[in-house]
């Protein structure tokens, strides 16, 4: 009898993921980007985050196209009609260009070139995760939940995902829906 450890974590897409989100990625064999759940209405940190620049926090918001209430993450698109990417590019460049990880920052800046953006919100968030994964030399596999066959709801959906990957350990968060 051989038991193989399989650590799976599940999290909604997030623009500029924060440290605990990255920790989930680091400690997982499989990281599921949970884009089959409802995109939050109102103000959320799903599409925005703070970065530290010159002794203050600066909020960067990824503009989202109008969508109907109840839309799933995979149905949500980035608004490419506004020139948000120049502001984000310049802000991140000013804040981090002299960091010890300048190579990572140069690679990150490429994600802000218009030709590399596209309108798919989840895909753009995953591009950030893939860059982090590459620079941390992680072997984690990143999977979009929308690519899995699963029409279940709530805990049943999560359990089906975990069973699909033969998870022995599930890294969860502490918030509602975790």
Image: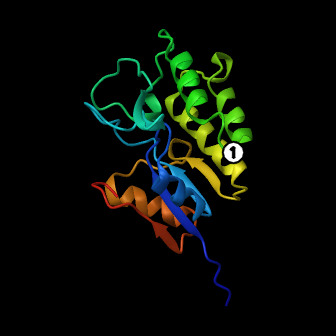
Q: Would residue 68 be found to the left or right of residue 32 on screen?
A: left
Q: Relative to the observer, which residue lies in front, 137 or 39?
A: 137
Few, some or many residues within 10 Å of mark 1 (<14, 14–19, 20+): few
Q: Relative to the observer, which residue lies in front, 63 or 84?
A: 84
Q: Position of residue 128 (x, y in %)?
A: 60, 39
Q: Secondary structure at mark 1?
A: loop
Q: Position of residue 92 (x, y in %)?
A: 56, 30
Q: Relative to the observer, which residue lies in front, 64 or 70?
A: 64
Q: Residue furthest bottom?
A: 1
Q: Relative to the observer, which residue lies in front, 74 or 149?
A: 74
Q: Position of residue 142 (x, y in %)?
A: 61, 50
Q: Position of residue 96 (x, y in %)?
A: 60, 36
Q: Which quadrant holds the N terminus?
A: bottom right
How many numbered circles does the render carry?
1
From this view, report whether residue 144 is shown above or below residue 96: below
Which residue shows up at 52% across the image and 24% down it? 88
Q: Would residue 70 be found to the left or right of residue 145 on screen?
A: left
Which residue shows up at 27% across the image and 32% down it? 41
From this view, report whether residue 168 is shown above or below residue 81: below
- Name the residue tied to disc 1: 101
Residue 124 sits in quarter: top right
Which residue shows up at 62% across the image and 63% down it? 29
Q: Residue furthest front?
A: 55
Q: Would residue 56 be found to the left or right of residue 109 on screen?
A: left
Q: Would residue 45 be found to the left or right of residue 6 on screen?
A: left
């Amino acid at each position: 009898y051989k038991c193989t450890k399989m650590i799976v974590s599940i999290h909604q897409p997030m623009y500029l993921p924060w440290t605990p989100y990255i920790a989930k990625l680091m400690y997982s064999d499989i990281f599921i980007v949970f884009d089959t759940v409802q995109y939050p209405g109102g103000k959320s940190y799903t599409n925005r985050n703070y970065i530290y620049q010159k002794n203050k926090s600066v909020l960067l918001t990824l503009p989202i196209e109008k969508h109907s209430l109840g839309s799933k993450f995979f149905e949500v698109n980035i608004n490419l009609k506004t020139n948000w990417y120049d502001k984000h590019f310049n802000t991140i460049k000013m804040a981090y260009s002299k960091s010890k990880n300048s190579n990572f920052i140069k690679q990150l800046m490429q994600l802000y070139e218009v030709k590399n953006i596209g309108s798919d919100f989840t895909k753009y968030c995953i591009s950030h995760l893939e860059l982090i994964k590459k620079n941390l030399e992680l072997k984690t596999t990143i999977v979009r939940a929308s690519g899995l066959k699963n029409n279940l709801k709530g805990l049943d959906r999560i359990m089906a995902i975990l069973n699909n990957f033969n998870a022995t350990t599930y890294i969860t968060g502490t918030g509602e829906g975790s």
